Amino acid sequence: MSEFLKLDRLTLGYGDTVAVEALDFAMQPGELVALLGPSGCGKTTTMRAIAGLMTPLGGTITLDGRDITRVPPNKRGVGLVFQSYALFPHLTVFENVAFGLRLARVPRVELTQRVDKALASTGLLHLAQRLPRELSGGQQQRVALARSIVVEPKLLLLDEPLSNLDARLRLEMRSELSRLQRELGIAMIYVTHDQSEALALADRIIVMRDGRIEQAGTPDAIYERPASVFVAGFMGFENTFVIHNGLLAGIAPIGFEVRDAVGLAWRPHAVVLGQGPHRGTVAGASYLGQVVEYLLTTPLGDIKAEAPASAPRHQAGETIAFDLPEASAVRLPRA
Ligand SMILES: Nc1ncnc2c1ncn2[C@@H]1O[C@H](COP(=O)(O)OP(=O)(O)O)[C@@H](O)[C@H]1O
Ligand SMILES: [Mg+2]
């Protein structure tokens, strides 16, 4: 496979502080990669380095076969969209989008064509003559997007671009971004701290932790087979337990071979209710249509379980047996 973007032992920092350490990462042309991780793990720092806004302490960045580690930002063919739109308040939507092309002295006819195309693909054509203050937050973010795609970057970096928008708009923009990415076939790195956003959008997810890559893989792989307790927790995996000396949560022997795992996790549908060696008290039951979700208080900690709505129902306060079957445990090899 051809490597379109390659980060090779990229190390980044501020003064004496190392923020990103020896990052290795490669992506394919046209790929949409989500960079996912908690605040402060080094996502923005990595984007800034790829865009050329900071000089690495070590390592190299290669884009489309060319070492761009020391190439100035405007010569990289990398577009960057931030959470804050930073539009020019005194320029119309059209002129905001045209700005980069004017700087590059693109001829007038071509400029108009390209701006109109970028406005059309972001659904802004009818707003071309408005000023930013006459637009909603979502529309302003679209202008920022149009402004970055009009210069036809090889790679587009989006750093938490939707986090200033309300929940409904975020969902709408999410699917538009995904459409736009398919239409333009442009490689994108989408930075987010929101796991559902990463799952919904990405071809591949890179989970970062403390300036390092914790796990990289397809959304399915990361969601189904988290490689660590950290990733499981971050991906909203329910029923994750850390093993101490072969004991689950330090209380009950788990009764099966845990091999090298330091943690075990079960999806709510994998918890067997009504039989098994463990006992729990039903703290709550929610009917969700096809299934009923139970929250159990147990000596192992809280357990979330799911049962088909057709199965016998349990009431709050009831004590029930449950099992955490070995076959459906997800093993977490690292902390
Ligand atoms: N301008 C700066 N000066 C010093 N430290 C910084 C600066 N920007 C970020 N950092 C530090 O670098 C680390 C990574 O930050 P950042 O890349 O912004 O994380 P993220 O985008 O994942 O939230 C954090 O520890 C942060 O405090
Ligand atoms: Mg950030």
Image (cartoon, rainbow, N blue to C red):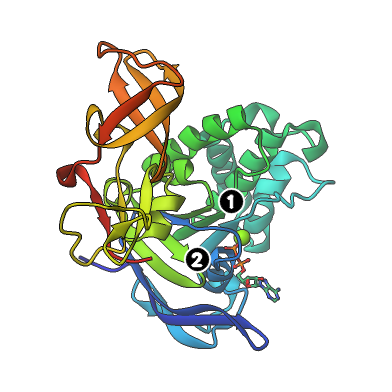
**Rendered position, 135 above or below 47:** above
Which residue is found at the position 16% from the left and 54% from the top? 256
In the image, is the residue at mark 2 within 8 Å of ligand 1 by its beta carbon? no
**Rendered position, 30 above or below 7:** above
Per the image, the residue denoted by label 1 is: 160
In the image, is the residue at mark 1 within 8 Å of ligand 2 by its beta carbon? yes
Label 2 crowding class (10 Å Cα cut-off): few <14, some 14-19, many 20+? some
Residue 214 percent coordinates (x, y): 39, 66
Viewer-side residue, 96 vs 17 = 17
User: Which amino acid type corresponds to the residue marked 1 in the rendered image?
Assistant: Glu
**Rendered position, 95 above or below 191:** above
Q: Quadrant of residue 64?
A: bottom left
Residue 279 percent coordinates (x, y): 32, 34
Q: Residue furthest right?
A: 90
Which residue is found at the position 28% from the left and 30% from the top? 321
* Quadrant holding the N terminus: bottom left
Per the image, the residue denoted by label 2 is: 77
Which residue is found at the position 33% from the left and 46% from the top? 223
> Does residue 184 appear anywhere in the picture?
no
Residue 15 percent coordinates (x, y): 68, 87
Instruction: Report, in whole angstroms, how far the alpha carbon at label 1 lies from the one at label 2.
Output: 20 Å
Viewer-side residue, 277 vs 324 = 277
User: Which amino acid type corresponds to the residue marked 2 in the rendered image?
Assistant: Gly
Q: Secondary structure at mark 1?
A: loop
In this rendering, the label closer to the viewer, 1 or 2:
1
Dividing the image into four quarters, tell me where ligand 1 lies.
bottom right
Which residue is found at the position 55% from the left and 58% from the top? 38
Q: Is residue 213 left or right of residue 245?
A: right
Viewer-side residue, 176 vs 22 = 22
| Label annotation for residue 222 | none
Q: Earlier in the sequence, mark 1 or mark 2?
A: 2
> Does residue 155 appear anywhere in the picture?
yes
